[in-house]
Amino acid sequence: RKEVEQDPGPFNVPEGATVAFNCTYSNSASQSFFWYRQDCRKEPKLLMSVYSSGNEDGRFTAQLNRASQYISLLIRDSKLSDSATYLCVVNRREVVTGSYIPTFGRGTSLIVHP
Amino acid sequence: NAGVTQTPKFQVLKTGQSMTLQCAQDMNHNSMYWYRQDPGMGLRLIYYSASEGTTDKGEVPNGYNVSRLNKREFSLRLESAAPSQTSVYFCASSEGVTREGRETQYFGPGTRLLVL
């Protein structure tokens, strides 16, 4: 089982729709969680961190469920410009070095159409 | 601030040739990373450097070497390129452990490498 799993999609939704992505992780020692956005042929960029209490940034809401080991991203009122690949990232702390080791999911593709 | 810069942007190599991918960051970050991204595979960590003077293997280190030249620069070397190393290579940096125990990574624009 991959350490971080995402449904690759694509999720094809009309403008204005609400869409949700999930991501599951297998390492219970994982400590921090993020959603990154990657546009075609570009570098990934941080969309938002994910906190246990859940957090919201405008139309985007992220949730973490440590017991079930998944994180989610909800996008409300989708815009054409939201079309991209959304990458789930899970960091675990390396015991020996103390470094945070990131593991990326394969990404979920979102296409928002008029 | 340029952020994270990578050179070259594109490269074509023949099997067996060597090359070094350069990465530099001007954010005074402690940690730096090299990833490769292949279609359908997501980003996979090749090597990382938690601080100047240290480097460690990631998920897919075979066929690569790295050098953390100083705090700003982290290079990736392919000693004898193989077609399986055709990929997009991203360098990233992060400030290290924040008060909340989180690391946000900042990525360079990538190097597209084709090995024939």
Image: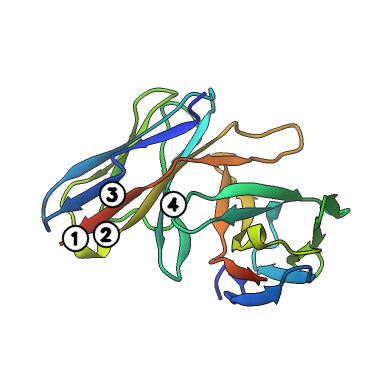
Q: Foreground mark, 1 or 3? A: 1
Name the chain under label 3: B
**Residue A11 locus on image (x, y percent):** 64, 76
Amino acid identity at mark 1: Ala
Q: Secondary structure at mark 4?
A: loop
Residue B64 is marked as 3
Q: Are tags 4 and 2 found on a single chain?
A: yes
**How far apart are labels 2 and 3 at the CA level?**
10 Å
**Residue A84 locus on image (x, y percent):** 58, 61
**How far apart are labels 4 and 2 at the CA level?**
16 Å
Q: Residue at x 47, y 58 (%)?
A: B43
**Whether residue A93 can be seen here:** no
Give the total of numbered labels: 4
Name the chain under label 1: B
**How far apart are labels 4 and 3 at the CA level?**
11 Å
Amino acid identity at mark 2: Gln
Q: Secondary structure at mark 2?
A: helix
Quarter occupied by the C terminus of chain B: bottom left
A50 and A27: which one is in front? Answer: A50
Residue B58 is marked as 4
Residue B40 versus residue B113 in the image, above or below = below
Q: Are tags 1 and 3 found on a single chain?
A: yes
Residue B82 is marked as 1
